[in-house]
Image (cartoon, helix red, strand yellow):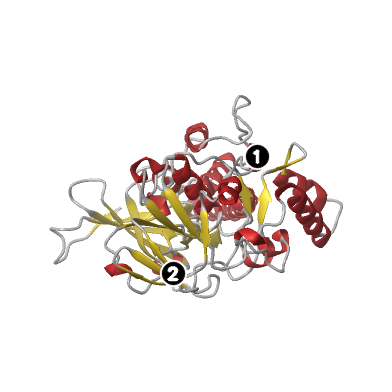
């Protein structure tokens, strides 16, 4: 560790730390999964996390009623199943408890409150330089980690996505992103516009309804809505099983047939289906189908109003693209998330401009010069786990080869020294 001084020395204690292994950026499920794999192979690592806890998206930016949308066996991380007494669809609190148990079991201790400002590959020395600012104490400190391998595990949902709307600054009412929404309790009796019709938009609208608010949900484009269960089995599990034997297009046809039989025709409620099937759309564009947990019943009864896109906002109002004007009290933006990788990773070959690996799953986990990515598959926790296993194995292989080579070099130097006497 090296201490340096300079004009900013009073403000920053500058340190340079060599890491005999990879640096993992992000202590969410993806980072933890990589950490467990490395721990099992005996590879040391440093894990950096900007928040004050693991899985900060789950702990700090999810609503109270959230549950996993697919069965727990498809959400567990490598080498550590969920407790048997957990329900098929664990609550967010149970999932957080599982992740904390996971970190404890594999002795994963992230450096919390440490934000990566930049990560750049030094071609001269063949090493990564990762600069961070730590805010865990009253005096912020700046650290530079030097490492051979860098694992980007910040995921595709690192930052909330806030689209621009004309006149929103003049609205005057309460506006928040869905990541800050906890419960509909404080919206009781209010007219709330929910912008977005994905799983979050649907569930926030349902929660508002259950708390006696009056939600209108903006549906700008087509969306696949599927029942969460078909014939008593998870729709996701059924799809996974069928894909072992049938082509994807046929599985899509079967799913849509069941959706029509169970849910009926949804177009009359303002919900049109895309031309591509739900699985094909997920694979090609990363758009997840909505698994209905009760919102459709509220839509049919008129308690959740489906409206088209927004043209502009004004004081206490939203004008829609069809000319209708809604009187509203609050706006909740269920507009999703995006990667924050472009803001700190100084690299353009492996990652695209929107912060997603250019190569699609299953080939998007490894870049050049010891760069890896986990959590960008658009296939949820199961996709992240598969990539984490590949990354941990690949790094462990390289680390062991380099460690063995160093031992041989040191032994050879030792023999030369002895021969001189």
Give the number of the disc on residue 244.
none
Residue 82 picture location, percent across and down: 60, 32
For image coordinates 65% across by 64% down, the residue present is: 272
Please determine whether, in this image, residue 44 is positioned above or below residue 305.
Answer: above
Tell me where residue 330 sits by quadrant.
bottom left
Is 415 on the left or on the right of 211, as rendered?
right
Tell me the residue that label 1 is attached to.
71
For image coordinates 43% across by 71% down, the residue present is: 346
Answer with mark 2 or mark 1, whichever residue precedes in sequence: 1
Residue farthest toward the top in the current orientation of the protein? 85
Residue 228 picture location, percent across and down: 66, 44
Distance between mark 2 and mark 1 Cα atoms = 33 Å
Residue in the foreground of this view, choosing between 189 and 106: 189
For image coordinates 72% across by 63% down, the residue present is: 280
Is 245 on the left or on the right of 363, as rendered?
right
Tell me the residue that label 2 is attached to.
342
Residue 195 picture location, percent across and down: 46, 61
Residue in the foreground of this view, choosing between 165 and 336: 165
- Say if residue 149 shows up in the picture: no
Residue 372 picture location, percent across and down: 55, 60
Q: Residues within 10 Å of mark 2 (few under 14, many from 20)?
A: some
């Amino acid at each position: 560790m090296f201490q340096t001084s300079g004009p900013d020395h009073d403000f920053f204690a500058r340190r340079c730390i060599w890491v005999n292994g990879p640096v993992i950026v992000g202590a969410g499920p993806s980072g933890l999964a990589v950490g467990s794999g490395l721990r099992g192979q005996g590879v040391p690592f440093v894990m950096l996390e900007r928040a004050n806890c693991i899985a900060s998206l789950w702990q700090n930016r999810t609503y109270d009623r959230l549950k996993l949308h697919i069965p727990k066996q498809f959400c567990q991380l490598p080498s550590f199943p969920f407790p048997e007494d957990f329900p098929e669809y664990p609550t967010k609190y149970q999932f957080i408890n599982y992740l904390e148990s996971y970190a404890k079991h594999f002795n994963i201790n992230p450096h919390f409150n440490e934000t990566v400002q930049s990560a750049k590959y030094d071609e001269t020395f063949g090493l990564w330089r990762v600069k961070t600012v730590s805010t865990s104490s009253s005096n912020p400190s700046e650290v530079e980690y030097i490492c051979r391998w860098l694992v980007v595990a910040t995921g595709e949902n690192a930052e909330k996505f806030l689209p621009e709307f004309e006149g929103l600054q003049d609205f005057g009412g309460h506006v928040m992103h869905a990541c800050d929404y906890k419960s509909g309790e404080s919206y009781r009796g209010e007219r709330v516009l929910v912008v977005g019709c994905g799983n979050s938009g649907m569930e926030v609208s349902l929660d508002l309804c259950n708390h006696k608010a009056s939600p209108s949900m903006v549906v700008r484009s087509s969306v696949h809505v599927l029942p969460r269960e078909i014939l008593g089995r998870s729709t996701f599990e059924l799809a996974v099983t069928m894909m072992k034997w049938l082509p994807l297009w046929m599985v899509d046809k079967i799913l849509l047939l069941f959706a029509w039989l169970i849910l009926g025709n949804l177009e009359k409620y303002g919900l049109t289906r895309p031309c591509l099937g739900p699985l094909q759309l997920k694979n090609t564009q990363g758009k997840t189908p909505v698994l209905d947990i009760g919102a459709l019943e509220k839509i049919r009864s008129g308690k959740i109003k489906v409206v088209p896109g927004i043209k502009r906002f004004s004081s206490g109002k939203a004008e829609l693209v069809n000319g209708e004007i809604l009187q509203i009290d609050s706006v909740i933006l269920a507009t999703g998330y995006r990667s924050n990788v472009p803001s700190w990773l100084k690299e353009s070959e492996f990652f695209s401009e929107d912060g997603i690996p250019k190569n699609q799953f299953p080939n998007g986990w490894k870049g050049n010069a010891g760069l890896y990515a986990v959590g960008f598959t658009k296939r949820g926790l199961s996709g992240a786990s598969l990539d984490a296993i590949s990354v941990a194995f690949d790094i462990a292989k390289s680390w062991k080869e380099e460690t063995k080579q160093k031992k041989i070099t040191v032994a050879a130097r030792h023999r030369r020294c002895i021969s001189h006497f």
